Amino acid sequence: MVAVPYSYTEELDFSFNDSKLPPQNIEAEEAVLGGILLDPSAIYRVKDRLQPEHFYIGAHKDIYKACLRLCKKGEPTDLLSVTSWLSDHELLAEIGGRNKLATLVNRTVCAVNIDYDAGKIIEESKLRELIRESYRTIKLAYDKTQDLTDKLSTVANRIKAVTDTPIAPTKEEYLRWKHDQLLEEVTNIYTTVVEPSFRFFRLEELAKEYSRSTNSLEHLYLKSLTAECTKLLTYEELKELAGSTVREWLVNGLVPKSTTILLAADGGIGKTKFAYGIAKTMIQGTQFGKFIATGQRRKILYYQGDESPGDMMQALESLGYSESDIGKYVRVRFGWSAENMPALLQDLKEFQPDFVVLDSLSTANKYSVYQESQMEYARPILQMTGLATQYKTTFLIIHHTNREGGVRGTTAIRNAVSEVWLLTKDNSQTATPYDRLLEINKSRSRSSGKKYRLMFNPEDLQFTFLGEESEQGFNGTEQSAKDALLEFFSNNRNTRFTTKELAHRLGYSDGHLRNCLGGLAADGLISAEPQNGRATNYFLVLESVTITPDHPCETPQSIARTQLEAVETGSIAEYPITPRSPPTITPVIHTLQWIQPKVIV
């Protein structure tokens, strides 16, 4: 055995002074107790913050406990009452007798500084607590019965309890601190631990640490999702928070930005294929009937649980996802469930999708302990509602209808989303087996209750837009004016027009166009921007898209945008738009264009 010189070993410095008294402030303790004995109302200023264990002197702890007991009973804390209570509980001699109490009163002039003195007592107690935990840490380091991992975990928890606990909290502040600490740890587990089994293990360990059940922790997390609210806002703060009063869309009148949509339909209706088609419209920047995309190259994230990879690929190929560079803007996950919420958070951060399709709510909740009829079944939707705002994305959640044609399951499912679409078969006498009705059953972004007629082609899986169901009863002139307005706005994207300007350019009366513009704006097909004391501006949004070298692409939309930017910068003159008569609409059958309704006899 080779002897190692002592000079080569690490020397630990244990030269701290053991003979030095622990941190304390006896004068402050005496001043607080004397103030309480002198002025019985003073205890109400400190009783919620100052605890008996904060005192350094044992006699002071007992005296303060006596004061708290009397205060709790509504009795005074003067010298006579405290002396009597201590005598009745055989503590008077232990604290130093009547002379001790008399001394506290004689040394105190008034209780005006009792709040300050109480704070000093609590600070010194905090330092003693830190020293106590440090000694316990040294003792634990020498303990050979525990492994290193357990030791480090124990030390971390002890130090955290000292450093994170607020100094001089009231009872309410302390309970708030405990709540916030627990909720932070629960939220961290639910949002960062990807593996469900390890997440459950972490929850069990946390439940043991806080002497609670895992069910209690889950309910705490659920309540945190539903109880969020802002501070009380002034009108100016509301305007700043809202940003713009103009509703933002991915597809005008159909898909709002930063929201949650529930698409409910019976089996075999084609709801998944409909979602694929709408997503393709957003990528290409085209339109589905009257619903015009506000941009192109939107990123789409599919969470597929109902279709196999083969079925999904076949459907996307039939819908033309292999065309151009559409596939570059699509990402897919299979087998996702609400238990994998951290994976969703990771995808939102890394891929930054504009549109997320979840197919379906039933498969996402396949491991849920709750039934579809229970309110807690809607928890994943509540989480997505918050994520939609946080990550500026829109979620489309596919679900099933019940026998009555409504949303299946608890009403909490319908209440948790901002938009509800119902896709059903058209059961009218003139309908074919492939005719469908899309109803905007609920909307916080546009008028609700309207139905649109579609036709599903089982060969290429595409939906054709046939028009609004009630259009057959519309005034022909009104419908013609609306069509003319949509065409005009489509050719003049991002340019704002007043009613008078539009009437002059299109050759209609102001009153007639005002009604038509109001209807289009209510349906979200165009944007309306009210002006203070001035006429409302109407326009159709086209968002600019950054074209990277990896994805060079020139489309009619990008050419139009370039021309519009040139007009705005003054590099070329504005294209003249001459007034014209209402256009004649020629029926053209196309899956992405509006067509006149076909009546099948």
Image: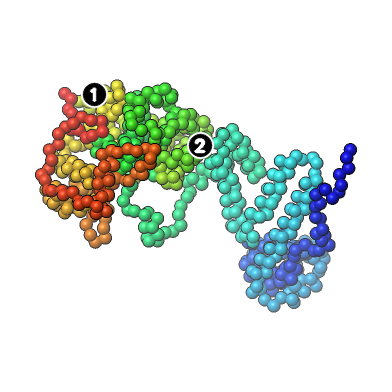
Pointer 1 residue:
432
Residue 457 position (above or below residue 115): above
Residue 396 appears at what percent x and percent y?
39, 37
Q: Circle 2 sits in a helix, a strand or a loop, which is it?
A: helix
Q: Nearer the viewer, residue 535 or 286?
A: 286
Amino acid found under the numbered disc labelled 1: Thr
Instruction: Return the mark for residue 343.
Output: 2
| 428 relative to 144 in the view: left or right | left
Residue 524 appears at what percent x and percent y?
28, 44
Q: Residues within 10 Å of mark 2 (few under 14, many from 20)?
A: some
Image quarter in which the N terminus is found: top right
Q: Are marks 1 and 2 in contact (CB under 8 Å)?
A: no
| 471 relative to 61 in the view: left or right | left
Residue 509 position (above or below residue 461): below
Residue 557 appears at what percent x and percent y?
27, 41
Name the residue: 65% across, 69% down: 116
Q: Earlier in the sequence, mark 1 or mark 2?
A: 2
Q: Nearer the viewer, residue 219 or 246?
A: 246
- Residue extending farthest to the left is 581
Amino acid found under the numbered disc labelled 2: Ala
| 478 relative to 536 in the view: left or right | left
Q: Nearer the viewer, mark 1 or mark 2?
A: 2
